[in-house]
Amino acid sequence: MVVGSGPNGLSAALTLAKAGRKVLVLESQPTIGGGTRTAELTEPGFLHDVCSVVHPTGMASPAFNSMDLSRHGLQWLVPEIGLSHVFGDGTALPLYTDLARSAEFLGRDARAWSATLGYMAAHSDELISDFFGPFRIPRHPLTAAHFGPQALLSADLFNRIAFRDPRTRTVFSAIATHVVRPPDAIATAAVGLLLGMLIHARGWPLARGGSQSIADALAAGLRELGGHVETDHPVYKFEDLPDAPLKLFDIDPRQFAAVMGDRLPARYRRRLGKFRFGPGTFKVDYALSEPIPWTDPHTGSSVTFHIAESDQQIRENEKDVQAGRIPKRPNLIGGTPSVLDPTRAPNGKHVAWAYCHVPHGSDVDMTEVVEAEIERCAPGFQDVVIARHTMTAKQYSVYNPNYVGGDINSGISDLRQQFTRPVAARVPYATPVPGVFLCSASTPPGGGVHGMCGKYAAEAAMAQESSG
């Protein structure tokens, strides 16, 4: 049995079903998906991804790639330009999936970018196998020796060592801050390297039709193997659950402790209580009458954009949100899925989105400052907006309780907590209660749409069961 139908819960369920187990998934909401839901948030016919939109770790995921999800309708769409970083003057630095084309725009840093990100892209399967999960001895020591020391650096220090051009440093810092930590924090280079290499290894893809198609494909695979999904079935107490030899929870440690009640030993409950959540996210989804009128044409051809004037701006903003302050000029992450996937909007129309980091639990509406940053780089943007839908960090925490305080990574992913989520243990998915496991993004490897937390948790559960 699995509680929760996010990508990790469904991945856990499908892993169990492939091993011949009878599986029931219980979902509290009317629709499955967790962070991979798609809905008409603004106007009829405009399909918006409520949470996650672009899925570099999804297409690269060993879990998803072992499940043949294309048979159940999942189609990855890979853009030619993986990312376009837009600076304060509206000019952009595009990162193509083709490394050689990216080098044309990286100037004096082209060789250094290829030597680091290019090398890792060529060995991406090995790196994902070794580092995308619980802590363990690497199976590919030479590749790990190349990646590991650099990954432990802060993004700032890596930038100073690797690159000379301020624009390149800004691009790398912006990628690294997907982890929602200041770029001068230790090991933030790891996220910049991982996501940066995936641009050139596999691209930063979309799921055709919206992120909901990922959850739908996982659920279809589960049903094909005899599994069942029940929606509108919240679980508040452990006693509410039907009997099952294995119970996996795709929920955060706080919810898990509440459901389990006195079944958890006091010491383990205290350790769960020390689990740390990070800053929140504010997101705007747009229905547009026409494409965003970017000053730089490369951004108009890109599905994903970052906006930040400098790495200093990024550093100051991320420190502000960590300290509970609202950034005055936030760095943005956003995109226009309909540039590549016309199914997202009515003919000739488009959808777009943008988000920024905000303090934990913030209920501040950032629409005005978000749109000011886009308008600066795309004059006339507000004239093409038909409708908008906003989600504050506080609203995100209500929409998906796993996003405590609006933390879309379900817990801080720093060096201290990355491999010890939710507690330091040889098998982090196991709990002191036999047959009960956690499989949410609050376990390794953490946030992102990849299903790896669910896969590892299901395998750990079956290993424990077989060992007696």
Image (cartoon, grey):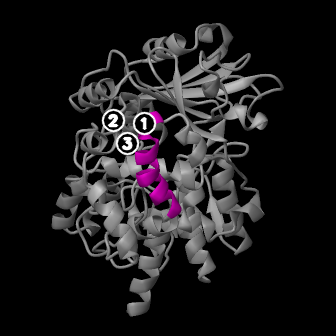
Secondary element at image label 3: helix
| Residue 117, magenta (yes or no) | yes
Could you tell whether 302 is left or right of 423 in the image?
Answer: right
In which quadrant is the C terminus drawn?
Answer: bottom left
Q: Which residue is mark 3?
A: 176
How crowded is the residue under tag 2: few (<14 C-alpha within 10 Å), some, or many (20+)?
some
Q: Earlier in the sequence, mark 1 or mark 3?
A: 1
Q: From this viewpoint, is residue 55 visible?
A: no
* Residue type highlighted by circle 3: Ala
| Residue 427, magenta (yes or no) | no
Please state the extent of the stretch shown in magenta in the rendering: 107-122
Q: Which residue is mark 1?
A: 108
Q: Name the residue located 32 percent from the left edge and 20 percent from the top edge.
A: 327
Q: Which residue is mark 2?
A: 164
**In the image, residue 271 above or below residue 355:** below
**Which residue occupies the foreground of this view, 344 or 7?**
344
> Residue 296: horizontal and vertical position, in percent?
60, 20
> Residue 136: horizontal and vertical position, in percent?
32, 74
> Residue 199: horizontal and vertical position, in percent?
54, 48
Q: Earlier in the sequence, mark 1 or mark 2?
A: 1
Asked whether disc 3 touches disc 2, contact meaning CB atoms under 8 Å apart, the reply is: no
